[in-house]
Image: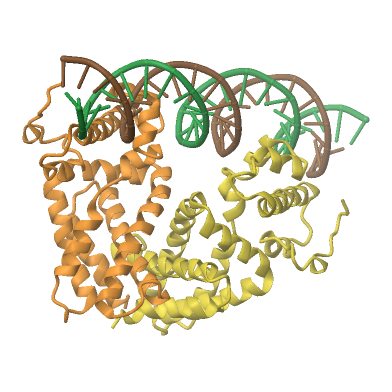
Chain colours: A yellow, B orange, C green, D brown
Amino acid sequence: MPENVDMSAMPRTRSLDSLAEDMQPQLGLRERKKLKTRVAIRRATYRLIAEQGYDATTVEQIAEAAEVSPSTVFRYFPTKEDIVLTDEFDPVIVAGLRARPAGEPFLESVRHVLVEATRLILAHDHEEMIQRTTLLVQVPALRARMMQSLATSSRNLCQVIAERTGREEDELEVRAYAMAILGAVYEASLYWAERDHKDDLAELVERALSAVRDGLR
Amino acid sequence: MPENVDMSAMPRTRSLDSLAEDMQPQLGLRERKKLKTRVAIRRATYRLIAEQGYDATTVEQIAEAAEVSPSTVFRYFPTKEDIVLTDEFDPVIVAGLRARPAGEPFLESVRHVLVEATRLILAHDHEEMIQRTTLLVQVPALRARMMQSLATSSRNLCQVIAERTGREEDELEVRAYAMAILGAVYEASLYWAERDHKDDLAELVERALSAVRDGLR
DNA sequence: CGTCAAGTGACAGTAACTCTCAAAAGAGGG
DNA sequence: CCCTCTTTTGAGAGTTACTGTCACTTGACG
C-alpha cells in the first residue's frame, strides 16, 4: 500500500476520516499508521456491509479484509456499530456556533451553522453520508447506538448554549432544548434516507429546525 | 405460588405491568398465565439488578429466579434491555391527547397531557419509575435501547399531531416536532434521576416543554 | 544501537441472542 | 372424562460480539 494516497482520485470511497486525514500534516509514523488502520477498518466495513448487509458482516470478516486481527478492530472501535457511526462533526459545529455574532437569536445561529455544516459535509463525504443514513434506516442496532452519539453531541451543544445564553450548561432547560434540536436534525436525516436521498438534506435540516421554532399550527 | 396475589399489599414492588394487570378482568387461563410470566420475569429482573447491578445480572439468572427457562425469557422480551424498558404509557398519552379540546394550541395539549400522565404514572408505579430512570442514567445500553422506545412513541405522537393539525403524519415537520418533544421529555427524566429524584418530575417535564416552546433567551 | 513504551496478535472465556425439536399443557368437542 | 388440536415451553446446540491476558513486534528516542 502506497504511503501517500491521492484522496481526490477516489471520489466514491472517501471516508468520513478524510476530513481528519486531510488536516494531519506531519505526525509521527506511529500516528500515521494508526490513522491508516482506522481508515482501513472503516473502508473494509463499509465495503463488506454494502455487499452482504450489516448483520451478515462479522467483525472477523472486517478484520480479515482490513488485514488486522479482530482484537485490533475492537481496540479502534469499542463496538461494531461505532465503526459505522463514528464521525468528527461536533467540533465543526461547535466552532461554527462560536463564530456566530453574539447578538443573534440562538436558534438562528443553530440553523445557519447546521445548514452550512450539512452542506460542507455533503460536499466532502456525500456517498458515505448516504450509506450511513441508509444503514441508519435499515439497522435498528445502529439507530440505538445513535443515542450515544446524540448524548455526546448534546453535551457539546449544551456547552455552547451555556456560553451564549449565560445559563448553566447542566440546566434542565438548556439540556431539553439541545436535545430537541438534535432530535429534529436526526429526524431530518432519517427522512432524507427514507426518501432515497432525493431531497436536499440541508434544506430538510432547515425545515426541521423551523418546525421546532414555530411549533405546528 | 398462589393464584391470586393481593397487589395492593406489595406497595414497593408493583410492576409497570400492574396497570395492564388491573384491567384484564377475565381472560382465558392461558392469557392470565402469560401475563403472570411476564410479571414474574420483570420482577425477578428488577430484584436481581437492584442486588447485583445490570451487567452482572445474566438472563440465565433471571430465568432461574422467575422459574422459567432462558428460552422463555427471550420469547417474552426480545432483548434484556426490553425487560427493563418496556412500558404501556403510549396509549395513555395518545388517548389523553385525543381528549383535549380541538382548538387548543398543540404544545399546550402536550404539556397538559404529559404532565398529567406523569403524575398518574408516578402515583401508580413510583418506585419502579425511580428504578428505571436510575438505570437509564447508569447503563449506556439502556439509554441506547431507549432510542427504539422513542421511535415508537414518536410514531404514535405523529399520528395524533396529524389528526390535530390536519397535516400528514409522515411529514418532516410533524416528525421533527414530535421527536423534539420526546427529546425534551427524555432529558427531563434523565435530569430527574441524576438529581436523585428530588424534584417533581411532572414539573420538570413542564419546564422542559416550555423551553422548547419559548426557545432560550 | 539499545532501551523503552506503544501497538498488535493469538487465545481463551463470557453472555446475549437464535434455531430446532420434542414434550407439556390449555382449549374445545364429543 | 377423554381425545385431539394448537399454543407454549424447555432443552440443547450454535453463532457472534465483546473482554482480558500475555507474549511478541515495532516505532520512538537518546
Identified at 16% across, 78% down, the residue is: B102
Indicate the position of residue B178 as horizontal and vertical percent values: 33, 68
In the picture, residue A61 is in which quadrant? top right
| Above or below, A212 relative to B34 | below
* Residue A6 horizontal side relative to residue B178, left or right: right
In this rendering, does residue B57 appear at all? no
In the figure, is residue A187 to the left or right of A116? left
Above or below D11: residue B5 = below
Left/right placement of residue A140 relative to residue A40 reads left
Q: Nearer the viewer, residue B62 or B67?
A: B67
Q: In this rendering, would B98 be left or right of A71?
A: left
Q: Quadrant of residue B109?
A: bottom left
Provide residue B173's location: percent of width, then percent of height: 39, 76
Residue at 67% across, 35% down: A71
Give the residue drawn at x 10%, y 32%: B10
Residue at x 18% of width, y 45% of height = B20
